Structures are given as C-alpha cells and as structure tokens.
Amino acid sequence: MINHQRADIDKLAQHYRTNYEPCVDDGLTKLHARMAHVDIAKPKKARPAIFQLAAALALIVAALAVWKFAFAEDPNLLYAEAETRQVTLEDGSQILLNHHTSIQLDENFNDTERRVKIDGEAFFQVASDPLRPFIIDNGKSVVRVVGTAFNLSQDEKGFIVEVSEGLVELHHGTDFIELGPKQCGMVQNDRLSSMDAPHLNRHAWRTGQIVFEDTAFGKVLADLSSAYRVKWNMQLSPNHGCTNLGFTARFNDDPIEEVIVAIERHYGLDITPVSGQENRYSITGSCR
Amino acid sequence: MQQTTSDLQLFERLRQGESQALDALFRQYYADCCRSAERILRDPAAAEDVVQELFLNLWKKRNTLPQIDEPRAYLLRSARNRSLNWLRDRSKMPQTDGELPDIPTAANQPTSQLELNELQARVDAAIDSLPERCRLVYVLCRLEEMPRDEVAQKLGISVKTVENQMTRAYKFLRQYLSVALLLTPTIWP
C-alpha cells in the first residue's frame, strides 16, 4: 500500500471513539472519596484538609437510652431475637438491631478499623472516627463510612442501604457508589444501583413512619414488606393493570391490618392472610 | 499538546504532598487518559476505573514518585499500561489473530454528503470490526503511538506478528473506509 494511503487512513482513525466525553468533575469527586480512604488506612502519614471536612460532616450521635446488654458467650456477637435491640459499641457507635438479626464484630474491632458482619437488618449511628473507618463486609459487598447514620439490611440477594445522614460508600467488587442523605443504594444480583429515598421508608421498622407519594404498586409492596416484615403471595389476574397505579398515603405506627385495608380500597384488590403462614398475605384481583 | 513547565511544577508539588497539585493534574489529563483507556477497553466505565486507580496510585505513591520529565506522556503511558493489564488480569487479551469480517455494503454506500458524525460513526465501525488482536495492534501502534516491540510484549506476540497485523488492519480499513477516504479532504481538513 502506498504510504500516503496509510497516512490518510491514520488521519481518519484519529477520530476513533472520540465521541466519548468523560466527566472530569464526577471523576474528581470520586477520586477525593477514594483518597480519603487511602489516608484513613495509613494514619501515620500527613493528612490533607479533606479529613477535617470528613470529620466535620460526621454525625454527632444522638443521645439514646443505652440498653444494658448481656453478651452471649462470644462477646463479639450481637444479636436480637424476637425484639429489636439497641447496642452501644466501644467506639461509641450505636446500633439498633431489627429482630432476628445478628452482628459479628471483628476480633480487632476498633484497632485500625471497625469491621463488622451482619445478617439481617439494623440502623447504624456510627461515631465519627476518621482514623478507623467503619466497614460492613459481607464478603462480596462492602459499606464504608467514617461517621453517619443509615439503615442496612442484608439478605441472600445482597445489601440494601438507606442513608439518613452523612455519606456512605457502597462497594461491590471494584465498583462503588456514594450515597448521601435520603438515598438508597443496593447490591442485588451482583449489580450496584441507587435510587432516591425521599421518605426513608426503609427506616419504618424503627420510626413507624411510612410515606407514599404517588408511589408505584411494586414499590409500595416492597416498602411495606421491609417495614412490617411481611411477605406477599402475588396472585393477580393477568392484565391486572396495577403496575403503574400510584398510591399516596402516610402511616404512622399503624398496624399492618389498617395499611392493608387502605391498599385494598385504593387498588380494588383482595389482600388476605395466608392461613398457617405468619406474616404472609395473598393478593388477588385486578386494578381495572 | 505542549508540555509546560507548570506540569512539571505540579508534579513536584504533588511529590511534596499537595493534594491541590493532584487535582490540577487530574483536571488537565483525566479526560485524555480516559479516552486512551477507552480506545483500548471499549468500555467507558472500565476506562474511568482504570484512570481513577492511576490517579489514586499517584497519591498513594507521592513520596516515592520518580523524577518525571514529561508528565503528560507519563500519565498517558500509565493509562495505556494499566488498561492492558486490566485486559490481561481479566483474561480478555485476544489469544488468536481472528478472522476479518466481510465489509457490510452499507459501509461503502456512496453518499454525496457524508456528515461529520456519520463519518465518525464509520470510522468507529471500521476499527471496531477488526478482530480484537488486530484492533489492539492498530490502536496501540498508530493511535497511542506505542513502540512496536512494547506492543508485542504487552500482547504476548512477536514483533513480526505486530507487523502482519498492521498490514492486515490497513488493508481492511482501506476497503471499509474507501468512500470516507475519498471524501475526507472536504470534511476533515
């Protein structure tokens, strides 16, 4: 091939994949978040101003009654059975465990980091300590914070984190997302995603408050399921037409039965307890 | 892009632990590094990850950074090498030369007025149609200006194979882009 032909091809090729425009500002924000951890991990090195910022952002933990807690044989194992349980850790962090939840503290907890494992759901108020990041690790996904408040549930599918104050990082593999107040992040089926959580409905098991504002049917059921620990047997008619039908209501410590009546009325569905199975309801009918 | 003294000063300040210097380098070169990485990886998210790691590592190693004469070249080289390592670590390095596909007839549909973005799309399609090894060889040698022996080493092939893949790439691209080549001078000066 003649050289000038090659040169012409090269000239054209200079435009290869130049449509791609990376966002520098987003990148820099992400870098700063990651730099914070580098320095946290190595406290001996000089720390830049970003730390003071992180410390300032950190939450002053609300004074809550501390329940006297009898530890099981393993002092690092915290658990709640039929009732929720409030625990204060040695670093000052407070955890409210939802029922049937256990939390295992790492044996070197509060040494250079504060690492825990969870099975179930809990509300965390992490005491600020930039030198010792608080890490919730389920092997595949990791939540990292310095000091903040958030609700976290973990089941076989993965983590769901809903943040009420401060900043939380949710890591999965090499990927991570940063969550601010009123944001919800999740790892489900190996995928990281996030959404807005304006009403913090995932905190409802603790706050008793649950708010729907033209909320889609599926989301309503999911939020109720998390708040009341109920499960749904979906037996809707084909073409039920419920999917995009919004629901608006505010509940405050209302029993599930009342919530269910409100939903039945709004959607025109039948929701009945499944006999022999606690906290399980079957949903039948159609919204049309 | 022209090398400036200020880049060198920025690197020097970074070595002294000034995080603003890292920010400034990031603002200046992040996009270029990402584009280089994306040309290799064809995956914007992966490219951005690779470049994030690169800058994070600059920060971690700031105390032990070598003397760098050309910051821009250094950063782009790092982005490239990290991208290739990314492929290697995920076993995504092409293992064979692969087959050249037939050129779609649409590619050479003569159009009297080829718009700039259409031409751009054709260039992307042409290069993306190359078998992966051939594509990487062309992109690395020509667009990323990597020395051929380095390309050979990174891809785990001989320099002779690099040469052969270059010839193959040119032959294919010349056919694929024949109309575009005809029209080039009128669109891209």
Image (tube, rainbow, N blue to C red):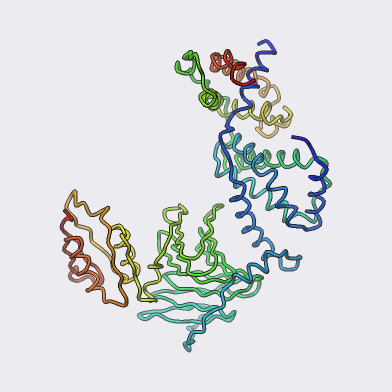
In this view, the residue in front, B21 or A124, is: B21
Q: Residue furthest bottom?
A: A68
Identify the residue at horizontal 77%, vertical 35% (top origin): B2
The answer, for residue B98, to whether it is visible in the render is no
Q: Quadrant of residue B180?
A: top right
Instruction: State the residue at coordinates (48%, 78%).
Output: A78
Q: In the displayed structure, would residue A100 be above or below residue A240? A: below
Where does the N terminus of chain A fall, quadrant-wise? top right
Q: Position of residue A149 (x, y in %)?
A: 51, 72
* Most foreground residue, B81 or A108: B81
- Residue beneath the point at 59% across and 27% down: B135
Q: Is residue B66 left or right of residue A288?
A: right
* B133 is higher (above) or lower (below) than B48: above
Q: Is residue A210 left or right of residue A51?
A: left
Residue B121 lies, with reference to residue A156, above or below; the image says: above
Q: Quadrant of residue A81?
A: bottom left
Left of A194 or right of it: where is A230?
left
Residue in front for this viewpoint, A160 or A115:
A160
Q: Position of residue A197 (x, y in %)?
A: 42, 63
Q: Is residue B73 left or right of residue A258?
A: right
Asked if A191 appears above or below A81 in the picture, the reply is above
Residue name at image x 72 percent, y 47 percent: B25
Give the quadrant of residue A58.
bottom right
Residue A170 in the image, given as x and y percentages of width and height: 52, 60
Residue B24 position, x and y percent, is: 72, 50
* Residue at the extreme top of the image, as rendered: A2
- The answer to whether one can see residue B17 in this image is yes
